[in-house]
Image (cartoon, helix red, strand yellow):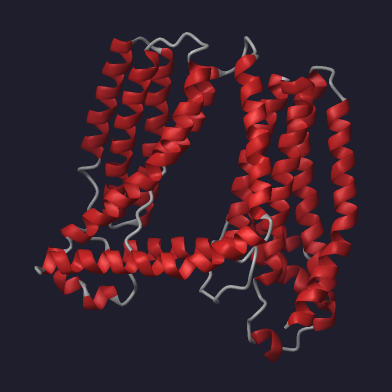
Protein backbone atom coordinates (compact mmCIF):
# COMPACT_ATOMS: atom_id res chain seq x y z
CA UNK A 1 0.00 0.00 0.00
CA UNK A 2 1.42 3.36 -1.08
CA UNK A 3 1.76 6.41 1.13
CA UNK A 4 -1.25 8.11 -0.46
CA UNK A 5 -3.41 5.02 0.04
CA UNK A 6 -2.39 4.84 3.71
CA UNK A 7 -3.49 8.43 4.20
CA UNK A 8 -6.82 7.72 2.49
CA UNK A 9 -7.28 4.73 4.77
CA UNK A 10 -6.59 7.04 7.72
CA UNK A 11 -9.31 9.37 6.44
CA UNK A 12 -11.77 6.48 6.33
CA UNK A 13 -10.88 5.35 9.87
CA UNK A 14 -11.34 8.85 11.26
CA UNK A 15 -14.66 9.33 9.52
CA UNK A 16 -15.88 5.97 10.82
CA UNK A 17 -14.64 6.78 14.34
CA UNK A 18 -16.58 10.06 14.34
CA UNK A 19 -19.77 8.30 13.21
CA UNK A 20 -19.38 5.69 15.95
CA UNK A 21 -18.67 8.43 18.50
CA UNK A 22 -21.78 10.46 17.66
CA UNK A 23 -24.25 7.64 16.97
CA UNK A 24 -25.25 7.19 20.65
CA UNK A 25 -26.07 10.90 20.88
CA UNK A 26 -28.34 10.64 17.85
CA UNK A 27 -30.19 7.81 19.59
CA UNK A 28 -30.61 9.92 22.72
CA UNK A 29 -31.84 12.77 20.54
CA UNK A 30 -34.45 10.50 18.92
CA UNK A 31 -35.66 9.33 22.33
CA UNK A 32 -36.08 12.89 23.61
CA UNK A 33 -39.05 13.72 21.37
CA UNK A 34 -37.00 15.82 18.98
CA UNK A 35 -37.99 13.59 16.06
CA UNK A 36 -41.66 14.16 16.86
CA UNK A 37 -41.05 17.91 16.92
CA UNK A 38 -39.24 17.77 13.58
CA UNK A 39 -42.06 15.67 12.12
CA UNK A 40 -44.56 18.30 13.22
CA UNK A 41 -42.36 21.02 11.75
CA UNK A 42 -42.06 19.10 8.46
CA UNK A 43 -45.81 18.51 8.22
CA UNK A 44 -46.61 22.16 8.99
CA UNK A 45 -44.03 23.36 6.47
CA UNK A 46 -45.40 20.99 3.80
CA UNK A 47 -48.93 22.25 4.35
CA UNK A 48 -47.79 25.86 4.14
CA UNK A 49 -45.70 25.16 1.03
CA UNK A 50 -48.53 23.41 -0.83
CA UNK A 51 -50.92 26.21 0.09
CA UNK A 52 -48.43 28.78 -1.13
CA UNK A 53 -47.77 27.24 -4.56
CA UNK A 54 -51.49 26.63 -5.11
CA UNK A 55 -52.44 30.22 -4.26
CA UNK A 56 -49.30 32.19 -5.08
CA UNK A 57 -50.07 35.93 -4.67
CA UNK A 58 -49.68 38.02 -7.80
CA UNK A 59 -47.16 40.28 -6.06
CA UNK A 60 -45.10 37.46 -4.53
CA UNK A 61 -41.35 38.30 -4.72
CA UNK A 62 -40.37 35.27 -6.82
CA UNK A 63 -36.93 36.53 -7.85
CA UNK A 64 -36.00 37.86 -4.39
CA UNK A 65 -37.07 34.58 -2.77
CA UNK A 66 -34.96 32.59 -5.22
CA UNK A 67 -31.92 34.81 -4.73
CA UNK A 68 -32.09 34.53 -0.95
CA UNK A 69 -32.88 30.83 -0.68
CA UNK A 70 -30.46 29.65 -3.36
CA UNK A 71 -27.61 31.94 -2.28
CA UNK A 72 -27.64 30.43 1.20
CA UNK A 73 -27.37 26.83 0.02
CA UNK A 74 -25.09 27.43 -2.97
CA UNK A 75 -22.53 29.45 -1.00
CA UNK A 76 -22.46 27.03 1.96
CA UNK A 77 -19.26 25.07 1.35
CA UNK A 78 -18.08 23.15 4.44
CA UNK A 79 -15.01 20.90 4.43
CA UNK A 80 -14.69 17.94 6.80
CA UNK A 81 -11.05 16.84 7.00
CA UNK A 82 -11.03 15.06 10.40
CA UNK A 83 -7.67 16.73 11.09
CA UNK A 84 -6.45 17.06 14.68
CA UNK A 85 -4.00 19.61 16.17
CA UNK A 86 -1.29 16.96 16.43
CA UNK A 87 -1.41 16.47 12.65
CA UNK A 88 0.34 19.81 12.20
CA UNK A 89 3.43 18.16 13.72
CA UNK A 90 3.17 14.55 12.60
CA UNK A 91 1.54 14.81 9.17
CA UNK A 92 2.96 18.08 7.86
CA UNK A 93 6.19 16.37 6.66
CA UNK A 94 3.92 14.31 4.36
CA UNK A 95 2.14 17.33 2.91
CA UNK A 96 3.12 16.37 -0.64
CA UNK A 97 1.24 13.07 -0.21
CA UNK A 98 -1.98 14.66 1.11
CA UNK A 99 -3.71 15.04 -2.27
CA UNK A 100 -5.64 11.78 -1.92
CA UNK A 101 -6.62 12.56 1.68
CA UNK A 102 -7.80 16.04 0.71
CA UNK A 103 -9.61 14.65 -2.33
CA UNK A 104 -11.66 12.35 -0.09
CA UNK A 105 -12.61 15.34 2.08
CA UNK A 106 -13.61 17.45 -0.92
CA UNK A 107 -15.76 14.71 -2.48
CA UNK A 108 -17.48 13.91 0.82
CA UNK A 109 -18.14 17.56 1.67
CA UNK A 110 -19.33 18.35 -1.86
CA UNK A 111 -21.91 15.58 -1.62
CA UNK A 112 -23.12 16.69 1.81
CA UNK A 113 -23.43 20.36 0.85
CA UNK A 114 -25.11 19.54 -2.49
CA UNK A 115 -28.06 17.73 -0.91
CA UNK A 116 -29.69 20.85 0.65
CA UNK A 117 -28.94 22.78 -2.56
CA UNK A 118 -30.81 20.20 -4.65
CA UNK A 119 -33.70 20.14 -2.17
CA UNK A 120 -34.09 23.93 -2.09
CA UNK A 121 -33.88 24.11 -5.88
CA UNK A 122 -36.59 21.46 -6.28
CA UNK A 123 -38.81 23.33 -3.81
CA UNK A 124 -38.22 26.63 -5.57
CA UNK A 125 -38.86 25.46 -9.14
CA UNK A 126 -42.70 25.23 -8.77
CA UNK A 127 -42.66 28.84 -7.54
CA UNK A 128 -40.23 29.91 -10.27
CA UNK A 129 -42.36 28.34 -13.02
CA UNK A 130 -45.38 30.40 -11.94
CA UNK A 131 -43.48 33.59 -12.75
CA UNK A 132 -41.94 34.70 -16.05
CA UNK A 133 -39.46 31.75 -15.94
CA UNK A 134 -37.33 33.45 -18.60
CA UNK A 135 -34.71 30.69 -18.78
CA UNK A 136 -36.63 27.55 -17.80
CA UNK A 137 -36.04 25.12 -14.97
CA UNK A 138 -33.25 23.11 -16.62
CA UNK A 139 -31.15 26.17 -17.42
CA UNK A 140 -31.63 27.46 -13.87
CA UNK A 141 -30.55 24.06 -12.52
CA UNK A 142 -27.44 24.16 -14.74
CA UNK A 143 -26.58 27.67 -13.57
CA UNK A 144 -27.06 26.57 -9.95
CA UNK A 145 -24.73 23.60 -10.49
CA UNK A 146 -22.09 25.88 -11.95
CA UNK A 147 -22.44 28.33 -9.07
CA UNK A 148 -22.14 25.50 -6.56
CA UNK A 149 -18.93 24.27 -8.16
CA UNK A 150 -17.55 27.82 -8.31
CA UNK A 151 -18.37 28.40 -4.65
CA UNK A 152 -16.57 25.22 -3.62
CA UNK A 153 -13.48 26.34 -5.55
CA UNK A 154 -13.71 29.83 -4.08
CA UNK A 155 -14.16 28.50 -0.54
CA UNK A 156 -11.01 26.38 -0.87
CA UNK A 157 -9.04 29.35 -2.18
CA UNK A 158 -10.27 31.40 0.78
CA UNK A 159 -9.05 28.73 3.20
CA UNK A 160 -5.60 29.00 1.64
CA UNK A 161 -5.33 32.78 2.21
CA UNK A 162 -2.73 33.95 4.68
CA UNK A 163 -4.61 36.89 6.22
CA UNK A 164 -7.95 36.52 8.06
CA UNK A 165 -9.17 39.97 6.97
CA UNK A 166 -8.62 39.16 3.31
CA UNK A 167 -10.32 35.77 3.79
CA UNK A 168 -13.42 37.36 5.29
CA UNK A 169 -13.53 40.01 2.57
CA UNK A 170 -13.28 37.43 -0.20
CA UNK A 171 -16.00 35.33 1.42
CA UNK A 172 -18.30 38.35 1.53
CA UNK A 173 -17.46 39.09 -2.11
CA UNK A 174 -18.21 35.49 -3.10
CA UNK A 175 -21.63 35.59 -1.46
CA UNK A 176 -22.44 38.96 -3.02
CA UNK A 177 -21.38 37.92 -6.53
CA UNK A 178 -23.34 34.67 -6.23
CA UNK A 179 -26.47 36.65 -5.37
CA UNK A 180 -25.90 38.97 -8.35
CA UNK A 181 -25.46 36.07 -10.77
CA UNK A 182 -28.61 34.39 -9.45
CA UNK A 183 -30.52 37.64 -9.83
CA UNK A 184 -29.37 37.83 -13.45
CA UNK A 185 -30.52 34.27 -14.22
CA UNK A 186 -33.89 34.91 -12.58
CA UNK A 187 -34.66 38.28 -14.18
CA UNK A 188 -32.75 38.49 -17.49
CA UNK A 189 -32.77 36.73 -20.84
CA UNK A 190 -30.41 33.82 -21.46
CA UNK A 191 -27.76 35.73 -23.39
CA UNK A 192 -27.73 38.57 -20.87
CA UNK A 193 -27.44 36.20 -17.89
CA UNK A 194 -24.71 34.15 -19.60
CA UNK A 195 -22.68 37.24 -20.56
CA UNK A 196 -22.99 38.71 -17.06
CA UNK A 197 -21.99 35.38 -15.49
CA UNK A 198 -18.92 35.14 -17.72
CA UNK A 199 -17.80 38.64 -16.70
CA UNK A 200 -18.28 37.82 -13.01
CA UNK A 201 -16.29 34.58 -13.35
CA UNK A 202 -13.39 36.36 -15.07
CA UNK A 203 -13.41 39.15 -12.48
CA UNK A 204 -13.56 36.69 -9.59
CA UNK A 205 -10.73 34.54 -11.00
CA UNK A 206 -8.54 37.64 -11.49
CA UNK A 207 -9.16 38.91 -7.94
CA UNK A 208 -8.23 35.52 -6.51
CA UNK A 209 -4.77 35.78 -8.08
CA UNK A 210 -3.89 38.73 -5.86
CA UNK A 211 -3.85 37.52 -2.19
CA UNK A 212 -0.95 35.52 -0.81
CA UNK A 213 -1.87 32.01 0.27
CA UNK A 214 -0.57 28.73 1.68
CA UNK A 215 -0.50 25.57 -0.40
CA UNK A 216 -2.04 23.49 2.39
CA UNK A 217 -3.61 25.59 5.19
CA UNK A 218 -3.04 23.20 8.09
CA UNK A 219 -4.00 25.53 10.93
CA UNK A 220 -7.11 26.76 9.13
CA UNK A 221 -8.34 23.23 8.42
CA UNK A 222 -7.68 22.07 11.99
CA UNK A 223 -9.54 25.09 13.36
CA UNK A 224 -12.50 24.51 11.03
CA UNK A 225 -12.72 20.84 11.98
CA UNK A 226 -12.63 21.72 15.69
CA UNK A 227 -15.40 24.30 15.20
CA UNK A 228 -17.58 21.77 13.37
CA UNK A 229 -17.15 19.24 16.17
CA UNK A 230 -18.04 21.89 18.76
CA UNK A 231 -21.26 22.63 16.91
CA UNK A 232 -22.20 18.96 16.91
CA UNK A 233 -21.69 18.75 20.66
CA UNK A 234 -23.50 22.02 21.33
CA UNK A 235 -26.46 20.48 19.50
CA UNK A 236 -26.19 17.19 21.40
CA UNK A 237 -25.99 19.18 24.63
CA UNK A 238 -29.66 20.10 24.19
CA UNK A 239 -30.61 16.49 24.94
CA UNK A 240 -27.90 14.93 27.15
CA UNK A 241 -24.64 15.76 28.90
CA UNK A 242 -21.71 15.60 26.50
CA UNK A 243 -17.92 15.62 26.99
CA UNK A 244 -16.54 19.05 27.79
CA UNK A 245 -14.83 20.73 24.85
CA UNK A 246 -13.17 24.11 24.51
CA UNK A 247 -15.71 26.77 23.55
CA UNK A 248 -15.34 29.32 20.81
CA UNK A 249 -15.46 32.96 21.94
CA UNK A 250 -16.46 35.86 19.69
CA UNK A 251 -16.18 39.53 20.68
CA UNK A 252 -19.35 40.69 18.86
CA UNK A 253 -18.56 44.34 19.47
CA UNK A 254 -21.97 45.36 18.12
CA UNK A 255 -23.57 43.67 21.17
CA UNK A 256 -20.88 44.29 23.81
CA UNK A 257 -22.53 47.56 24.86
CA UNK A 258 -25.39 45.54 26.37
CA UNK A 259 -23.06 44.26 29.11
CA UNK A 260 -22.47 47.84 30.29
CA UNK A 261 -26.16 47.99 31.19
CA UNK A 262 -25.66 45.33 33.88
CA UNK A 263 -25.10 47.03 37.27
CA UNK A 264 -21.70 46.33 38.81
CA UNK A 265 -22.85 44.71 42.06
CA UNK A 266 -22.65 41.39 43.88
CA UNK A 267 -26.30 40.55 43.25
CA UNK A 268 -25.71 40.79 39.49
CA UNK A 269 -22.61 38.59 39.31
CA UNK A 270 -24.33 35.73 37.51
CA UNK A 271 -26.44 38.12 35.44
CA UNK A 272 -23.22 39.51 33.96
CA UNK A 273 -21.69 36.04 33.60
CA UNK A 274 -24.62 34.49 31.75
CA UNK A 275 -25.27 37.61 29.69
CA UNK A 276 -21.62 37.66 28.56
CA UNK A 277 -21.77 33.93 27.83
CA UNK A 278 -24.90 34.36 25.73
CA UNK A 279 -23.47 37.26 23.75
CA UNK A 280 -20.01 35.81 23.12
CA UNK A 281 -20.33 32.04 22.75
CA UNK A 282 -21.64 29.83 19.96
CA UNK A 283 -25.08 29.77 21.59
CA UNK A 284 -25.41 33.50 21.04
CA UNK A 285 -24.28 33.20 17.44
CA UNK A 286 -26.89 30.54 16.73
CA UNK A 287 -29.60 32.60 18.43
CA UNK A 288 -28.70 35.67 16.36
CA UNK A 289 -28.81 33.70 13.11
CA UNK A 290 -32.08 31.99 14.03
CA UNK A 291 -33.62 35.32 14.99
CA UNK A 292 -32.54 36.94 11.71
CA UNK A 293 -33.84 34.06 9.59
CA UNK A 294 -37.03 33.79 11.64
CA UNK A 295 -37.74 37.51 11.35
CA UNK A 296 -37.28 37.41 7.59
CA UNK A 297 -39.39 34.28 7.06
CA UNK A 298 -42.11 35.52 9.42
CA UNK A 299 -42.26 38.86 7.61
CA UNK A 300 -42.53 37.21 4.20
CA UNK A 301 -45.26 34.81 5.32
CA UNK A 302 -47.19 37.63 7.02
CA UNK A 303 -46.76 39.96 4.06
CA UNK A 304 -48.07 37.25 1.71
CA UNK A 305 -51.13 36.81 3.94
CA UNK A 306 -50.93 33.01 3.73
CA UNK A 307 -53.88 31.21 5.38
CA UNK A 308 -55.41 34.62 6.22
CA UNK A 309 -52.45 35.42 8.46
CA UNK A 310 -52.50 32.16 10.43
CA UNK A 311 -49.43 30.83 8.60
CA UNK A 312 -47.42 33.63 10.22
CA UNK A 313 -48.78 32.52 13.60
CA UNK A 314 -47.58 28.94 12.95
CA UNK A 315 -44.13 30.08 11.77
CA UNK A 316 -43.86 32.41 14.78
CA UNK A 317 -44.59 29.52 17.16
CA UNK A 318 -42.10 27.20 15.46
CA UNK A 319 -39.24 29.70 15.57
CA UNK A 320 -40.01 30.60 19.18
CA UNK A 321 -39.88 26.90 20.09
CA UNK A 322 -36.47 26.49 18.44
CA UNK A 323 -35.14 29.71 19.99
CA UNK A 324 -36.32 28.73 23.46
CA UNK A 325 -34.56 25.37 23.20
CA UNK A 326 -31.37 27.05 22.02
CA UNK A 327 -31.40 29.70 24.76
CA UNK A 328 -32.16 26.98 27.32
CA UNK A 329 -28.79 25.41 26.53
CA UNK A 330 -27.16 28.35 28.31
CA UNK A 331 -27.74 26.65 31.67
CA UNK A 332 -25.14 24.00 30.80
CA UNK A 333 -22.39 26.36 29.70
CA UNK A 334 -20.68 26.70 33.13
CA UNK A 335 -21.96 23.46 34.59
CA UNK A 336 -18.59 21.76 34.94
CA UNK A 337 -16.24 24.74 35.36
CA UNK A 338 -13.97 24.52 38.39
CA UNK A 339 -13.47 28.23 39.03
CA UNK A 340 -17.02 28.73 40.33
CA UNK A 341 -16.04 26.53 43.29
CA UNK A 342 -12.77 28.42 43.82
CA UNK A 343 -13.86 32.05 43.66
CA UNK A 344 -16.33 33.45 46.25
CA UNK A 345 -19.35 33.40 43.92
CA UNK A 346 -22.88 33.87 45.38
CA UNK A 347 -24.09 30.40 44.40
CA UNK A 348 -27.49 30.82 46.08
CA UNK A 349 -28.31 33.56 43.60
CA UNK A 350 -27.20 31.62 40.54
CA UNK A 351 -30.56 30.10 39.58
CA UNK A 352 -32.54 33.32 40.05
CA UNK A 353 -30.03 35.35 38.05
CA UNK A 354 -29.83 32.76 35.29
CA UNK A 355 -33.64 32.73 35.01
CA UNK A 356 -33.54 36.53 34.77
CA UNK A 357 -31.12 36.44 31.82
CA UNK A 358 -33.15 33.68 30.16
CA UNK A 359 -36.37 35.70 30.58
CA UNK A 360 -34.86 38.86 29.08
CA UNK A 361 -33.45 36.95 26.11
CA UNK A 362 -36.75 35.19 25.43
CA UNK A 363 -38.71 38.46 25.72
CA UNK A 364 -36.41 40.22 23.23
CA UNK A 365 -36.67 37.35 20.72
CA UNK A 366 -40.44 37.03 21.14
CA UNK A 367 -41.00 40.77 20.72
CA UNK A 368 -38.81 41.12 17.62
CA UNK A 369 -40.37 38.10 15.91
CA UNK A 370 -43.86 39.31 16.79
CA UNK A 371 -43.23 42.74 15.31
CA UNK A 372 -42.11 41.23 12.00
CA UNK A 373 -45.40 39.31 11.89
CA UNK A 374 -47.77 41.91 13.35
CA UNK A 375 -46.75 44.97 11.32
CA UNK A 376 -47.39 43.54 7.81
CA UNK A 377 -50.61 41.90 9.04
CA UNK A 378 -51.78 45.20 10.55
CA UNK A 379 -51.16 46.95 7.22
CA UNK A 380 -53.58 44.42 5.69
CA UNK A 381 -56.09 45.02 8.55
CA UNK A 382 -55.59 41.50 9.91
CA UNK A 383 -55.35 41.51 13.70
CA UNK A 384 -56.65 38.24 15.15
CA UNK A 385 -53.53 36.09 14.37
CA UNK A 386 -51.28 38.79 15.87
CA UNK A 387 -53.36 38.95 19.04
CA UNK A 388 -53.39 35.16 19.37
CA UNK A 389 -49.60 35.10 18.86
CA UNK A 390 -49.15 37.76 21.53
CA UNK A 391 -51.38 35.85 23.94
CA UNK A 392 -49.50 32.61 23.36
CA UNK A 393 -46.16 34.36 23.80
CA UNK A 394 -47.26 35.99 27.08
CA UNK A 395 -48.53 32.64 28.41
CA UNK A 396 -45.26 30.97 27.46
CA UNK A 397 -43.20 33.73 29.08
CA UNK A 398 -45.19 33.55 32.31
CA UNK A 399 -44.85 29.76 32.65
CA UNK A 400 -41.26 29.33 31.45
CA UNK A 401 -39.44 30.51 34.63
CA UNK A 402 -41.22 27.94 36.84
CA UNK A 403 -40.55 25.14 34.37
CA UNK A 404 -36.93 26.24 34.08
CA UNK A 405 -36.43 26.26 37.86
CA UNK A 406 -37.99 22.81 38.11
CA UNK A 407 -35.69 21.47 35.40
CA UNK A 408 -32.63 22.95 37.10
CA UNK A 409 -33.69 21.39 40.40
CA UNK A 410 -34.10 17.95 38.79
CA UNK A 411 -30.72 18.21 37.07
CA UNK A 412 -29.08 19.21 40.38
CA UNK A 413 -30.63 16.19 42.13
CA UNK A 414 -29.41 13.86 39.38
CA UNK A 415 -25.84 15.07 39.90
242 sits to left or right of 9:
right
130 sits to left or right of 211:
right
Q: Nearer the viewer, residue 330 or 28?
A: 28
Q: Nearer the viewer, residue 251 or 390?
A: 390
**Residue 65, horizontal then vertical, whole percent:** 54, 25
Q: Nearer the viewer, residue 374 or 58?
A: 58
Is residue 78 among what the camera can see? yes
Q: Give the residue at x 28% y 56%.
A: 105
398 versus 41 height, above or below: below
204 sits to left or right of 330:
left
Q: Give the residue at x 64% y 71%.
A: 333
* Badge count: 0
**Residue 162, horizontal then vertical, whole percent:** 28, 57
Q: Which residue appears farthest toward the left when viewing the image?
A: 2
Q: Give the residue at x 61% y 39%.
A: 293
**Residue 376, horizontal then vertical, whole percent:** 75, 24
Picture quadrant of residue 384: top right
Q: Give the residue at x 78% y 20%.
A: 308
**Residue 157, horizontal then vertical, whole percent:** 26, 48
Quadrant location, the C terminus: bottom right
Q: Nearer the viewer, residue 51 or 366?
A: 51
Is residue 213 among what the camera can see? no
Picture quadrant of residue 205: top left
Q: Which residue appears farthest toward the bottom when viewing the image?
A: 342
Quadrant location, the N terminus: bottom left
Amino acid sequence: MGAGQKLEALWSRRARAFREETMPYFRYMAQSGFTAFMSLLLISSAIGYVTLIRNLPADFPIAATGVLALTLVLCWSPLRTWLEPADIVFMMPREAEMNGYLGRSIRYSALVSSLPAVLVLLLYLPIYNQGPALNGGWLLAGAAAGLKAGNRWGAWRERQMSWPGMRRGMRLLRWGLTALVLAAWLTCELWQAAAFSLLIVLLYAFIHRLPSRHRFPWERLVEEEARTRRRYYVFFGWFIDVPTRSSSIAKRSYLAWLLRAVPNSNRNTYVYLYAASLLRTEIGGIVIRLLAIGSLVTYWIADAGSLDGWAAFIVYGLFMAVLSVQIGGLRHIHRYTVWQHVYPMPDKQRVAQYVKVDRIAIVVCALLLWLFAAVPLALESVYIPSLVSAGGAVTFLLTRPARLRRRLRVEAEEE
